[in-house]
């Protein structure tokens, strides 16, 4: 299964995402922002970082990269696409996903291990999780506050399109942000489109895929967490199905 | 060269963390009596040739697609500046 990972100028987490794809059992394919070609991949990951230095708005300029026209077409055709952090911001800018991300309400960059509840296990990227399973993966961002108008939020809730929600149990954070790390509406950490093939989330599953390098798992020791791997194994299943 | 100036502001219902940070810093520097601050963006676009209605229409589209994100921001003004310096 060929899974592409797009590198934009300023992308940081493409190497980790490629590694996560391999550890999940997929064939990792490097994709370049300036190239108008998806190289026959069957799914795409838009990784985290600060593409184009977050100039204008996070994700705003990446959205017009040549590779994105292909990604948008493929996503509309049903190809699984996962946007992580900056990749989620890019998906919002393309309007493949509704809403937008603004600066964290406490105005600081925040990095911590973040528990999330998986509320939708029928997307292309979450079928290997059980309903309402709580996973713990790293979160690190400055512009992570998910906002949308009330009508959009109500629609996301009614249609079960909130995929990941922030829950209690994180390691640390500013006062008032112990559960919700950034002021996101409805504690939303990740959402999907109507079809369930496009998923975006702010925290980083690709940093929690290998024992010894992941988040601390309470009761199991330091850096043991591998909860992020489930996204990269789920997509293989969705492509077989 | 004629210049078109575009002003973009966060929507009124959207919290503006940068504006709040500026508002909190002002009294620390002794600037009192400012109730709130909202921070926006100003774009200056130099246009080749005359600013016709057609050019303006295309710039309005650019303003509402790339220069602003309509989910969180409004284009509050789009003004043509006279090449001699004043506003037309």
Image (cartoon, rainbow, N blue to C red):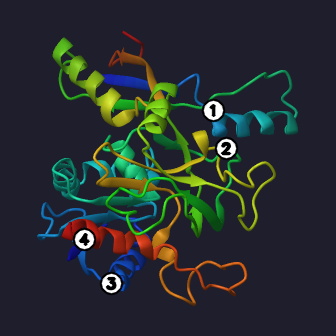
Residue at the image position 61 percent from the left and 77 percent from the top: A215
Name the residue tied to disc 2. Answer: A105
Whether residue A212 is visible = yes
Q: Are marks 2 and 3 in contact (CB under 8 Å)?
A: no
Chain bearing mark 1: B
In the rendered image, residue A53, in percent from the top left (x then y), is placed at 45, 57
Q: Secondary structure at mark 4?
A: strand
Q: Earlier in the sequence, mark 4 or mark 3?
A: 4
Name the residue tied to disc 1. Answer: B15
Q: Residues within 10 Å of mark 4 (few under 14, many from 20)?
A: many
Q: Are marks 1 and 2 in contact (CB under 8 Å)?
A: yes
Of badges 2 and 3, the one in the foreground is 3
Q: Is residue A213 left or right of residue A177?
A: left
The vertical placement of A135 against A66, above or below, is below
Q: Residues within 10 Å of mark 1 (few under 14, many from 20)?
A: some
Q: Are marks 3 and 1 on the same chain?
A: no
Name the residue tied to disc 3. Answer: A22
Q: Are marks 4 and 3 in contact (CB under 8 Å)?
A: no
In the rendered image, residue A137, in percent from the top left (x then y), is placed at 57, 70
Q: Secondary structure at mark 3?
A: helix
What residue occupies the far front of the structure in this picture? A131
Name the residue tied to disc 4. Answer: A4
Viewer-side residue, A171 vs B69: A171
- Which quadrant: the N terminus of chain B? top left
Whether residue B1 is visible = no
């Amino acid at each position: 299964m060929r899974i592409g990972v797009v590198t934009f100028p300023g992308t940081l987490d493409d190497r980790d995402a490629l590694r996560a794809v391999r550890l999940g059992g997929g064939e990792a394919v490097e994709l370049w922002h300036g190239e108008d070609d998806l190289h026959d991949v069957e799914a795409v990951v838009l990784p985290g970082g600060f593409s184009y230095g977050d100039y204008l708005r996070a994700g705003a300029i990446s959205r017009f990269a040549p590779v994105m026209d292909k990604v948008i077409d493929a996503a509309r055709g049903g190809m699984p696409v996962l946007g992580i952090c900056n990749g989620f911001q890019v998906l919002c800018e393309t309007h493949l996903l509704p809403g937008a991300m603004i600066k964290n309400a406490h105005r600081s960059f925040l990095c911590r291990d973040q528990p999330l509840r998986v509320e939708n296990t029928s997307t292309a990227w979450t079928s290997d999780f059980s309903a309402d399973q709580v996973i713990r993966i790293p979160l690190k961002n400055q512009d992570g506050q998910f906002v949308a108008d009330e009508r959009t939020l109500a629609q996301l809730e009614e249609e079960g399109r909130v995929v990941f929600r922030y829950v209690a149990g994180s390691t640390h954070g500013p006062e008032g942000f112990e559960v919700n790390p950034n002021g996101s509406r409805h504690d939303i950490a990740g959402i999907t489109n109507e079809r369930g093939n496009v998923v975006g989330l702010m925290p980083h599953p690709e940093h929690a895929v290998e024992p010894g390098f992941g988040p601390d798992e309470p009761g199991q020791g330091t850096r043991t967490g591998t909860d992020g791997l489930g996204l990269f194994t789920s997509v293989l299943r969705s492509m077989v199905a | 060269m004629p210049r078109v100036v575009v002003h973009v502001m966060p929507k009124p219902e959207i919290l503006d963390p940068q504006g709040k940070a500026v508002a909190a810093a002002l009294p620390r520097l002794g600037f009192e009596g400012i109730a709130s601050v909202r921070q926006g963006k100003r774009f200056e676009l130099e246009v080749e040739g005359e600013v016709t209605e057609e050019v303006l229409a295309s710039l309005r589209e650019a303003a509402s697609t790339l220069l602003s994100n309509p989910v969180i921001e409004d284009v509050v003004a789009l003004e043509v500046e006279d090449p001699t310096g004043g506003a037309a």
